[in-house]
Amino acid sequence: MDAEIMALPIEKKIEKSKEIIAEAIERYGNKLVAAFTGGKDSTLMLWLTKQVCEEKGLEMPECIFINEGSVFEEVLDYVARMRREWGLVIHEVKNEDVLKQVNKVGDIVYVDKLNERNRRELERIGFHGDSFVFNPESFEGNHLMKTVAMNMFIEERGIQAVMTGIRWDEQEARRDEVYFSPRDNPKHMRVHPILHFTEREVWQVLRENRVPVNELYAKGYRSLGAKATTQPVSDKPAWEQDFDSLPERAGRAQDKEGIMKRLRDLGYM
Amino acid sequence: MLIIGVDSATWDVILPNLDRLPNFRKLMEEGEYSTIHLNQKPWSPEVWCSMFTGLLPEEHGHHDFVVNNEIVRREDIKAEFIWDLLDRAGVSVKALNVPFVVPPYNFNVDFEPVAGGVPVEQDELLEEIERVTQKALEVLRNSKPEVFIVAYTALDKLSHLHWGEPVLVDFYERVDEAIGKLIPYDDEVLVISDHGFCDYDAAPIRTLPRRTPKGEIKGDHHPDAILIKKNIPCEITQPIDVFYCIKARYLGD
């Protein structure tokens, strides 16, 4: 995390992001894809990309949407809406082989029924069990449903760069990320044009420019994960919440709503 | 005295798998074991509350985790728990992760609840077993009280969703390992469950609907709970006897 860049005024941050996006499009052309999650951060990234393309007369990069098997209907609706309103090309990426076995979180995935690629991937991450419970946010689930699904898309299409909306202040693990971050297996570049935005600034830009956002944020969700494991943080819209005292990823923390939802999911009420 | 609560533990899983549960086996060999045939409803908030207040549900009045859309807290329960009595009498006592409320209750122990207090997914259940054990070891090594109560809830969630599946025995193994780490620290040990488990269709009561947002429920609560005691002479046939047993040992009759 670069403290000097973090301290820039918001206009400078927008400029910085646009430069990175322009450079990525210039370098990778149609071998660049933008990862769109339906969340606020990748929405900001796409909005900035749209500005760059309009200003410079460039073609909008194609997008990928990773369907990890437990997606809010509101997210799917929103992705469809953005496809329509902004004319985006969005490829839906999913690990079909795993989804053949499961309908919902909690279903069992039997390893011997998986294809060779998925079995190899499980071994690679050190999983040696015969089965596991499907959950896109568990270690095995996350790897197969997100990482492997995306890697397969990269390999099949010869993609050279993937642009994502991660941010330095979002969580500890992201503090050391850089704007252009080379990856292996498969070899490609990760581009992170909005690393330097804070959550508050993301909302400021989206609200001031009337960028359409997912309706879940209006219902109090701060950070969108898998449907089965994400709860709203408060009954206030995300952009009106107390950013300083409530952590952005608190949707799973010990708030009342979270506990109640977990109990309800178990059928306790 | 070390009291280890294992939510939902049943002989129906332990006895046929003793070769995989060496610490259960060791305790059973060194002490005595029996079945508690519950006279009260096999319902966790009520039973754990009875166990540590010595009161029946109609007396302690605590019937559910949530009442009128509000989460019930310790302060809402108008009863004295064994740790309140001991503490007042100057007997050192600590309690960790006791699941009569959500998040589970701690007394004289700082513990950040696992998964917001309701671990459900397997990784969260494993995290519970690991973090509760770690915290319990910290207590036993650095500031061991005369009475230490520690409970694990993982088997309950897992039994509801995976009753009859091999993964359940894997989790009993994890709990067995955890127990194995704690029991060397005390000569007087009590291991107890709040109720047993059985096939959903065979359950005498239904605590959950068959279909839930987490999937189909395969097992439900059975009124036969487990008890293992080592170097504890008192007779325990019902959950409330645990309260009187601890009280007699430290405060006299």
Image (cartoon, coloured by chain):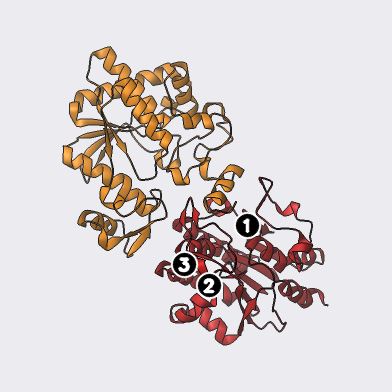
Chain colours: A orange, B red
Describe residue B90's horizontal placement relative to residue A3 as left or right: right
Ranked by sequence position, the earlier of labels 1 and 3 is: 1
Badge 3 sits on which subunit? B
Badge 2 sits on which subunit? B
Marking on residue A254: none
Query: Does the CB distance between marks 2 and 1 fall below 8 Å?
Result: no
Assess disc 3: are there few (<14), some (14-19) or many (≥20) residues with their C-alpha within 10 Å of its C-alpha.
many
Q: In the displayed image of the protein, which residue is found farthest to the bottom?
A: B29
Q: CA distance from mark 1 to mark 3?
A: 23 Å
Mark 3 — residue?
A: B163
Residue B36 shows up from this direction: yes
Mark 2 — residue?
A: B181
Foreground pick, B185 / B4: B4
Badges 2 and 1, same chain: yes
Q: Point out residue B83 in the picture as x, y percentages from the top left corner.
A: 74, 64
Residue B144 shows up from this direction: no
Q: Point out residue B156 in the picture as x, y percentages from the top left corner.
A: 54, 64
Query: Does the CB distance between marks 1 and 3 fall below 8 Å?
Result: no
Ranked by sequence position, the earlier of labels 2 and 3 is: 3
- Residue A110's quadrant in the figure? bottom left
Q: Where does the N terminus of chain A fall, quadrant-wise? A: top left
Amino acid at dot 2? Lys
Amino acid at dot 3? Trp
Q: CA distance from mark 2 to mark 1?
A: 21 Å
Mark 1 — residue?
A: B104
Foreground pick, A11 / B115: B115
Q: Is residue A25 above or below residue B64?
A: above
Q: Is residue A265 above or below residue A161?
A: below
Q: Can you tell which of label 2 and label 1 is closer to the viewer? A: 1
Q: Can you tell which of label 1 and label 3 is closer to the viewer? A: 3
